[in-house]
């Protein structure tokens, strides 16, 4: 079956610290992988995506590389800001159906 | 507006009552999804529409839940005989493509069943 497992939070970091949020997946076929972000009081929005193995998605200083050999899609940012405080969701689409499967979310708080 | 619109944003009801939640997707998006999000959890798939038809309703938890999209645009999620366990945020998302396309989410409808 299809599923996503992501690092549990909450995560608290100081401004300018390095961020990693781990995400691994199980999927049939060749999925597309996504990170969605939910800022306080807002709906989920796409942060970045990768559609095939070895692709790197990037946006707003965040990066994630689609690693087929380790079935992972870890989210990284070199220097977080207070404005990055949000809940981050890893997700996949199996491309054989139309469901998106989401992880449980990781809450990030960045303190000045 | 340009985004996905969901109404009501908050709904409080009593156990046993009937509830309707509405979603107005982005114009031109043929794919529409309903998800349910409980506190501390990720979105849980309920149903997916491609056009007017429900292409996948495997996530609906039981026959108290039903959704329609009669004209291929606005969708209504209907919950009969609500139970306290139905309390959650119900999310709607739309997409240009049914597979691997970016999902655009509304802000959700928070349902509380007393």
Image: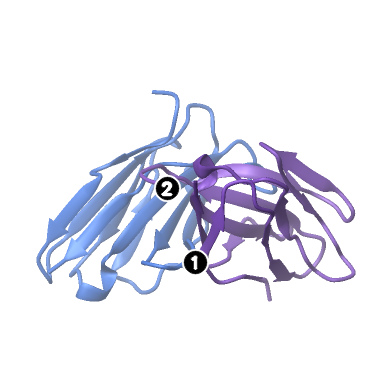
Chain colours: A purple, B blue
- Toward which corner of the image does residue A90 lie, by quadrant? bottom right
Which label number is shown at residue A60? none
Q: Chain of mark 2?
A: B
Q: Position of residue A8 (x, y in %)?
A: 56, 72
Q: Label 1: which residue?
A: A10
Q: Quadrant of residue B87?
A: bottom left
The answer to whether residue B21 is seen in the rendering is yes
Circle 1: element type: loop
**Residue A106 rendering spot, x and y as whole percentages:** 54, 63
> Which residue has dot 2 on it?
B92
Going 35% across and 48% down the picture, which residue do you hit? B108
Residue B11 screen position, x and y as percent: 18, 53
The residue located at (23%, 44%) in the rendering is B8
Q: Are marks 2 and 1 in contact (CB under 8 Å)?
A: no
- Above or below for B48 versus B24: below
Q: Is residue A47 left or right of residue A49?
A: left
Q: Is residue B53 above or below residue B18?
A: above
Q: Is residue A73 above or below residue B105?
A: below
Front residue (pair A107, A2): A107
Q: Quadrant of the C terminus of chain B?
A: bottom left
Query: Same chain for marks 2 and 1?
Result: no
Total marks placed: 2
Identify which residue is drawn at 30% across, 44% down. Answer: B22
Q: CA distance from mark 2 to mark 1?
A: 26 Å
Q: Quadrant of residue B19?
A: bottom left
* Helix, strand or loop for disc 2: strand
What chain letter is assigned to the residue under label 1?
A: A
Near mark 2 (Cα within 10 A), the count class, few <14, some 14-19 or many ≥20, is: many
Image position of B60 with respect to A87: above or below? below
Q: Is the N terminus of chain B in the top left, top right, bottom left or bottom right quadrant?
A: top left
Q: Is residue B103 visible to the viewer in this orientation of the structure? A: no
């Amino acid at each position: 079956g299809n599923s996503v497992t992501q690092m549990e939070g909450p995560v608290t970091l100081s401004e300018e610290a390095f961020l990693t949020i781990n995400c691994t997946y199980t999927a049939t076929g060749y999925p597309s992988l996504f990170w969605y972000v939910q800022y306080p009081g807002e709906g989920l929005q796409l942060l970045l995506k990768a559609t095939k193995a070895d692709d790197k998605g990037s946006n707003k200083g965040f990066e994630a590389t689609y690693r087929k050999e380790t079935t992972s899609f870890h989210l990284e940012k070199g220097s977080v800001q207070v404005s990055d405080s949000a809940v981050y969701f890893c997700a996949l689409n199996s491309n054989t159906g139309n469901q998106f499967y989401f992880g449980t979310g990781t809450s990030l708080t960045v303190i000045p | 507006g340009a985004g996905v619109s969901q109404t009501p944003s908050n709904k409080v009801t009593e156990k046993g009552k009937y509830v309707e939640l509405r979603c107005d997707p982005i114009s031109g998006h043929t794919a529409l999804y309903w998800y349910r999000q409980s506190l501390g959890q990720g979105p849980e798939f309920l149903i997916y529409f491609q056009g007017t038809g429900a292409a996948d309703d495997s996530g609906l938890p039981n026959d108290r839940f039903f959704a329609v999209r009669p004209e291929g645009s606005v969708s209504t999620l209907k919950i009969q005989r609500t139970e306290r366990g139905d309390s959650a945020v119900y999310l709607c998302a739309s997409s240009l493509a049914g597979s691997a396309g970016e999902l655009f989410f509304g802000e959700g409808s928070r349902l509380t069943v007393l």
